Amino acid sequence: MKRILEKLETLDRRIIFIFIFLSIAIPLLLPVNMDFSVTPPVRSFYDAIESIPPGSKVLVSCDYDPGSMPELFPMNVAAFYHLLSRDLKVITIQLWPTGTLLAERAMSEVLKDLPVKEYGVDWVNLGFKEGREVVMVSLGTSIPKTFPNDMHGTKIEDIPIMEGVNTFDDIAMLVNISGGLPGTREWVQQVVLRYHVKLGSGCTAVVAPEFYPYLQSGQLVGLLGGMKGAAEYEKLIKRPGTARRGMDAQSVSHIVVFLFILIGNIAYFSVKGVKKRLKV
Amino acid sequence: MRREIPIAICFLAGIFYTLELFIPHRQVLSIFETVRQWAQILIAFAYVLAIANILRVNFHAIQKNQRDWPYKVVLIVSLFFMITLGIFFGGIGEGTIFDWVYYHAQYPLQSTMFALLAFFIASAAFRAFRIRTLEAALLAVTAVLVMIGRVPVGEELWNNFPDFTEWIMNVPQLAGKRAIMIGAALGAISTALKVLTGLERTYLGGE
Amino acid sequence: MIPLSETIGIWLGAALTLCVLSFLYKDNPFFKFAEHLFVGISAGYWATLEYYNMFLPNLWEPLTQQGRLLLLVPFALGILLFSRFTKKFSWLSRWPMALVIGIYAGIAILGYMQGDLFPQIHANLRPLVTDNWLTSFNNILLTLGVITGLLYFFFSKEHKGALGGAAKVGIWFLMISFGASFGYTVMSRMSLLIGRVLFLLKDWLHLVN
């Protein structure tokens, strides 16, 4: 037994890699579709959008890149779908250049289900703008001056949805799909209290715990954290997507990581004894 | 001239923008807006500078026939290839060749690079996550509770697991994060003040 | 019927995915190729987006079509940035750099004050005794955690005696906080791999619907 534990201590990491791969591939091949409940931060996000009167304009800032796509793309699609299906007008911008084409693709997926929605009337993509926090603050002074054109080069004054949109006062809510910096933290710091903006965030799981203080202080009206947050949101809008699909694999892989921590510690303490290893 | 002018520019720009909040006059705001637009343009230039630097470093490596130089050729060719596609072959919108390359090359490359971290975090959990102290135990127990409580299998094991995890996130976890947030805010404000007053000058370079 | 361009794209994506995953075995030419290709494409993508979304609408068109000559100032400052490549004039690049750093420092001061510092202190001022025992308990725990956590970051006095004890409690809260972050990080990393494996199994191999 001791020899096995000793071997475990020096286990080739590639064996660990194989276990991780299988813990994800097998549940994807043989799904059981475990059910789950919706957590309060996701429910608040959903409720915040539900409370906006139809016809209002919502600004969606898609600040992410392919690196976080499995987590954020499903919530981007779900947010667009939720907004448009409630007859809200979507104005999307990006503070990450990589977000531009991802936002376009997310909208294409939604338009397959809602083909009546028209570009320029129901939604518009103003594209990417460099400047991070500077852009956020500039939007508070003038949206048309910050984004003089949409992403295709059309002048902002020629786009019907942008009529009467000057500052955050003309926006019912801001939704941020955030892959890092600049993202939700910067939106909270620069615009929420300064311009009295209602902000809902969809972010990667890595940073989600950091945004709980904002949620509790009311600076965020809702929070979708990672693929699980996206799956809960998909459940609420009754449009299951890739996030819902990944939940079995997510469960199994977490169990495997837990077992790794457990076995790693058992091996560690068994080989030289608990007393020698423990630092009290 | 070489040091004093940049320090003065930095000080004036910073103070100007701190005061912006307190002077909401239309005329003054339009000045802020103008300078903000300048800053945006300058940052765009800074990215172009970064790209120029990538080119310079890699051309240099190719010229000197350094180890792995053929890969540097791949880098430079793909860089110009992408720019050429975007500017001369139909723009950047959905359905363009530029979009095709982005979606079928950059997306898999970048997202797989990040996906590699899944393997390494599992390996680190196995090899380095040792519960030798009370603090390490607190960290490990919370990590496991959150990991299991946040996914559907946790709810299958215990009905109230998601509520319990939510409590951890909303109370003890939040307390720690808030302490870090307040501490970091104080640190960031003092660093920014040091930059503005010229006490912190590393951005000026070596001289 | 999937269009041919899409099929080629999926095969390309799968090949590049496997090139990157090959690093798990060990560093190899396929990974190195993928790595450099990624940097090249990303930089090219970034430059193109800057051209279409910044250079044209925010600088070139206002300058040439609307005659906003004041924009020559940031244009000139932007050019000065490139003086970094010369030894003699590299000091000139400090001017535009100083402007940007100054603006961001000013914005950061406001942001951290109005976004983090004051609202977070305010949000933590909670009643310690309420009608509901759980709310009271939570509020006490929250207050204790934030205060002791902050005391841990107070390094002007040695952590001994009462301060040492409080800082120790602060560490416990911080550890719980880091534990939660670790749990969420695992969640995040696994999600990313799920995305890639799903692509391989569904879009490429058609093993799942």
Image (cartoon, helix red, strand yellow):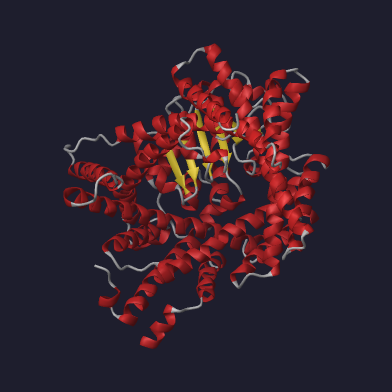
Based on the displayed image, in which of its 4 quarters is residue C18 positioned?
bottom right
Q: Which of these two is toward me, B96 or B156? A: B96
Q: Which of these two is toward me, A78 or A140? A: A140
Return the x and y of residue C123 as percentages of the image width and height: 31, 34
| Residue for point 25% across, 42% down | C147
The vertical placement of A163 against C102, above or below, is above
Based on the displayed image, in which of its 4 quarters is residue B90 positioned?
top right
- Side of C83 where C172 appears, left or right: left
In the rendered image, which quarter contains the N terminus of chain B? top right
- Side of C130 where B30 appears, left or right: right
Q: Is residue A115 visible?
A: no
Return the x and y of residue C83 as percentages of the image width and height: 70, 37
Q: Is residue A94 visible?
A: yes
Based on the displayed image, in which of its 4 quarters is residue C21 positioned?
bottom right
- Side of B63 where A216 appears, left or right: left
In the rendered image, which quarter contains the C terminus of chain B? top right
| Residue for point 24% across, 35% down | C126
| Residue for point 44% across, 42% down | A223
Q: Which of these two is toward me, A117 or A161? A: A161
Q: Tag count in the figure?
A: 0
The vertical placement of C4 against C104, above or below, is below
Return the x and y of residue A169 as percentages of the image width and height: 50, 21
Return the x and y of residue B72 as percentages of the image width and height: 74, 58
The vertical placement of A131 against C167, above or below, is above
The vertical placement of A243 against A46, above or below, is below
